[in-house]
Amino acid sequence: MNFSPRRPALAAAGWAGLLALIAACGTPSSPTAPHADAAAWLAAVPADRLIDLSYAFDTTTVYWPTARRFERIQDAAGMTPEGYWYAANSICGSEHGGTHLDAPQHFARDGWTTDRIPIEALVAPVRAIDARAGAAADADHAVTVEEIRAHEAAHGPIPRGAVVVLHTGWGDRWPDLKRYLGDDTPGDASRLHFPGLSEAAARFLAVERGPAGIGIDTASIDPGPSQDFRSHRVLAAANIYALENLDNVERLPPAGATLIALPMKIANGSGGPVRVLAILP
């Protein structure tokens, strides 16, 4: 499969979403320094309108069973002979663990690497699709085209360049490996159970809607039992990134919020840790 990247739409929809939000809320008047207007507005956003969609990285962080887990090594922490405090740590771990971004290159040879994802695609309007009913009925539920269309019937078409976040309710299980992944056997990813996105729904989004990214509150865009990661492959072929292990998605409205997802800019990376924020309308 070979879907064409949608660069112009991504740029327009991503920045337009943030600028429209700023305009709707009002900014200080400063015709000569619009960047200062935006900075002032952002500084004035009430805390309850900012949502942190990322988990902290520590020894409890959920990683794929075959991935190297997060490790923080304390290199220094204490007073120096000169009388000032100094602390430094070394960190290591897989690109794909905790709240992280899957770059398209993760499943598409010629897809964007982490550092090549246009920054415009990382600032986007959010559509949050409630998939909790299906996930509650079936731990391996794969979100369908019909669920996406039902969301659109209630909240309007998903705009090009948006980030579609799937709310399965799985965040309530974090960081319990057994409950969150469906199995906690070290090094074995063959018996996992959690919800994801169906291949048909991934293809519908990639071809018909053109989102910048897809997010989910589980360990993978594909359902746990998947061994061939078809949804990943469809999205990656269209240069659509994935955000996995998102926190606090229950606080997102179905429409109207703006997402900012800034991954570590790893050269030639297939993904990486990401701090994801949402600004509520």
Image (tube, rainbow, N blue to C red):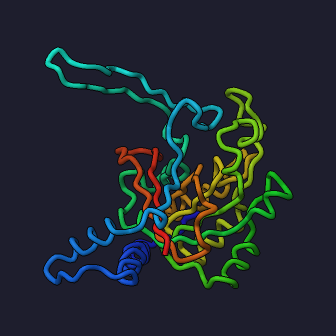
Between 233 and 141, the one lying in front of the other is 141
- Locate residue 236 relative to residue 46 in the image: left or right: right
Which residue reaches farthest right?
137
Which quadrant: the N terminus? bottom right
- Locate residue 103 relative to residue 31 in the image: left or right: right
- The residue that appears at 52% across and 63% down in the rendered structure is 213
Task: Tell me residue 265's x, y (percent).
Answer: 35, 48
Vertical order, 90 against 236 (above or below): above
Between 269 and 161, the one lying in front of the other is 161
- The residue that appears at 39% across and 79% down in the rendered structure is 16
Vertical order, 20 against 211 (above or below): below
Task: Tell me residue 169's x, y (percent).
Answer: 71, 56
Between 215 and 22, the one lying in front of the other is 22
Task: Tell me residue 173's x, y (percent).
Answer: 71, 45
Vertical order, 213 against 53 (above or below): below
Task: Tell me residue 82's x, y (percent).
Answer: 14, 18
Which quarter of the figure has residue 90?
A: top left
- Locate residue 239 relative to residue 180 in the image: left or right: left
